[in-house]
Image: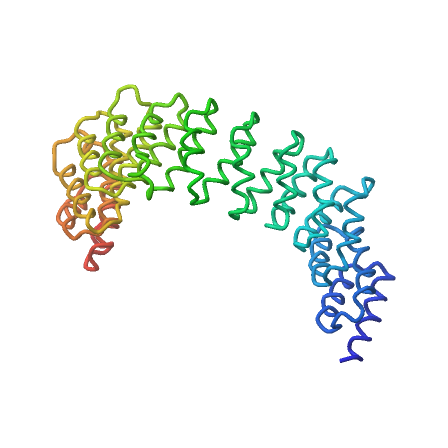
C-alpha cells in the first residue's frame, strides 16, 4: 500500500510540474482514498493551483477533492474569498466550497462578504453557502436582518435553511418595506406548521402588493387542517374577486385544496359570472375537479348546460377525464355520456367529440363502451381514432382493424 502511495505521489508531482491538471486531479482522487491523510498538507498544495488555474470542469472536480481533504482547506479558501483582486469565478468556487464544509470558521468570512461586496452574483453565492450551513449560520444571518443593505440576502439565506429556528427571525421582517423581503419571508414561513404563521398569512391577504397576497393565499391553502378553526374558505373567498388575475387564480387553487361544498359554491358563482375573465374561468374549471367532490362535478355539468363558450366546453370535457377518485369516476363518465348522447351544440364540434372519447378512455369505465363503439363510425377521422384508442384501453377485443 505504501509503495502504491509513493508511486501516486510521484505521478501527482510530475503532473503538477507539467501543469497537467486533468491527470493531477485523477492522482489526487486516488491518493485521498489510500493516503489516510498522512500527506494532506502536501496534497492541498498540489490541489489549490487547479482551483486557481483550471477550467470550469477541473475546478468543479477539485472542489470535491478539497472537501475530502477536510478542514485544512478552509483557511486557504477564506484567503481566496477575501482577495478582492482574485478572479470572480475563483471566489465563487471558494464561497460555494466553504458552504459545503458547514463549519463555524466559514461563517464570519461569508457574512463579511455579504456586508462588503458590491458584486450581486458573488453575494448571492455567499447567501446560498450560508443557507447550506443550516443552524450554524442562523444567529449571524439574524443580525444581518437589522441592516438595510444585507436584509434581503439574509432573508433568502434563512429561507434556504428551512428549519424551525428560522421562524422567529423571519417573522421579524414580514412587514418590511421592501417587497422582496416580505415575499421571501412569507414564502419560507408558509412551509412551517407553526401556530405563529397562519395569522401572519391572513394579515398578508390584504397587502397592497399582489405578489404578497398571492403568496399568502397559497400558503394558507396548505393548511386544510385549520380550515374550520380559522374559517379559511370565508377569508380566502373574496380573493376570487381580486384586482390581480394571478391572485384570483391562486385563490381558485387554494379553495380546491381546502375542499368542501362551500368552496365549490364560491368557485361556481365566480365561474358563471359574465365579468370573469376566461383565464380565471379555466382555472376554476380545473379547481372544481381537483376539489374532489360530487358537488364539483355537478357544477361542471351545470356549466355545460348553461354556457355557450366552446373554450369552456372543451376544458370541462378534458378535465372530467382526469378524475381519479373511484367514487367520482362513475359520475364523470355519466356526465360525458349524457353530453355525447344529447343534442348539445358541443357535439357538433369534432374537437370536443374527440376530447370526450379521450376522457372516457382515461376514466376506464366499461359503461362507456357502447357509446365509444358508435363513435368509431363517426365521419371525422380524428374522432374515430380517439374512439378506437379509448376502446383499446377499455377492452382488449378492440383493435385497429376497426378503422
Q: Quarter-wise, where is residue 7 in the image?
A: bottom right
Left/right placement of residue 76 relative to residue 341 reads right
Q: Residue furthest right?
A: 17
Q: Would residue 394 be seen by someone viewing this image from the given angle?
A: yes
Left/right placement of residue 59 relative to residue 258 reads right
Q: Is residue 287 above or below residue 59?
A: above
Question: Count of labels shown?
Answer: 0
Q: Quarter-wise, where is residue 323 in the image?
A: top left
Q: Would residue 134 be seen by someone viewing this image from the given angle?
A: no
Q: Residue furthest top?
A: 275
| Colour scheme of the rendered structure | rainbow
Q: Nearer the viewer, residue 29 or 108?
A: 108
**Percent position (x, y) of residue 303?**
20, 30
Q: Nearer the viewer, residue 192 or 296?
A: 192
- What residue sits 26% from the left and 34% below the top? 263
- What residue sits 61% from the left and 50% below the top? 132
Left/right placement of residue 12 relative to residue 191 reads right
**Percent position (x, y) of residue 387?**
22, 46
**Quadrant (top left, top right, bottom left, bottom right) of the N terminus:** bottom right
- What residue sits 71% from the left and 56% below the top? 63
**Percent position (x, y) of residue 329?**
20, 48
**Percent position (x, y) of residue 114?**
70, 38
Q: Is residue 26 above or below residue 177?
A: below
Amino acid at each position: 500500500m505504501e509503495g502504491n502511495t509513493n508511486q501516486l505521489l510521484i505521478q501527482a508531482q510530475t503532473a503538477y510540474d507539467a501543469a497537467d491538471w486533468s491527470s493531477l486531479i485523477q492522482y489526487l482522487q486516488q491518493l485521498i482514498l489510500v493516503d489516510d491523510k498522512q500527506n494532506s498538507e502536501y496534497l492541498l498544495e498540489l490541489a489549490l493551483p487547479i482551483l486557481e488555474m483550471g477550467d470550469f470542469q477541473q475546478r468543479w472536480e477539485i472542489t470535491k477533492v478539497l472537501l475530502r481533504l477536510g478542514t485544512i482547506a478552509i483557511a486557504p479558501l477564506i484567503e481566496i474569498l477575501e482577495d478582492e483582486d482574485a478572479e470572480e469565478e475563483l471566489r465563487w468556487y471558494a464561497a460555494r466550497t466553504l458552504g459545503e464544509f458547514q463549519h463555524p470558521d466559514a461563517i464570519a468570512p461569508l457574512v463579511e462578504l455579504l456586508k462588503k461586496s458590491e458584486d450581486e452574483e458573488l453575494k448571492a453565492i455567499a447567501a446560498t453557502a450560508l443557507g447550506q450551513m443550516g443552524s450554524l449560520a442562523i444567529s449571524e444571518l439574524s443580525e444581518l436582518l437589522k441592516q438595510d443593505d444585507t436584509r434581503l440576502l439574509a432573508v433568502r439565506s434563512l429561507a434556504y435553511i428551512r428549519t424551525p429556528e428560522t421562524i422567529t427571525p423571519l417573522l421579524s421582517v414580514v412587514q418590511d418595506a421592501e417587497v422582496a423581503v416580505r415575499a421571501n419571508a412569507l414564502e419560507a414561513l408558509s412551509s412551517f406548521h407553526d401556530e405563529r404563521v397562519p395569522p401572519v398569512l391572513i394579515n398578508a391577504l390584504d397587502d397592497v402588493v399582489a405578489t404578497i397576497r398571492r403568496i399568502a393565499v397559497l400558503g394558507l391553502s396548505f393548511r386544510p387542517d385549520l380550515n374550520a378553526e380559522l374559517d379559511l374558505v370565508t377569508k380566502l373567498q373574496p380573493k376570487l374577486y381580486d384586482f390581480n388575475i394571478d391572485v384570483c387564480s391562486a385563490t381558485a387553487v387554494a379553495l380546491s385544496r381546502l375542499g368542501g361544498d362551500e368552496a365549490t359554491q364560491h368557485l361556481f358563482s365566480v365561474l358563471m359570472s359574465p365579468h370573469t375573465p376566461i383565464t380565471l374561468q379555466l382555472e376554476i374549471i380545473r379547481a372544481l375537479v381537483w376539489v374532489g367532490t360530487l358537488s364539483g362535478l355537478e357544477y361542471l355539468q351545470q356549466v355545460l348546460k348553461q354556457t355557450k363558450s366552446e373554450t369552456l366546453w372543451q376544458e370541462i370535457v378534458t378535465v372530467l377525464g382526469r378524475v381519479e377518485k373511484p367514487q367520482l369516476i362513475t359520475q364523470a363518465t355519466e356526465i360525458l355520456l349524457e353530453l355525447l348522447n344529447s343534442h348539445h351544440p358541443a357535439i357538433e364540434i369534432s374537437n370536443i367529440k374527440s376530447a370526450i372519447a379521450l376522457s372516457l378512455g382515461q376514466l376506464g369505465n366499461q359503461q362507456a363502451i357502447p357509446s365509444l363503439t358508435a363513435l368509431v363510425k363517426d365521419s371525422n377521422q380524428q374522432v374515430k381514432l380517439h374512439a378506437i384508442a379509448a376502446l383499446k384501453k377499455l377492452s382488449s377485443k378492440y383493435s385497429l382493424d376497426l378503422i
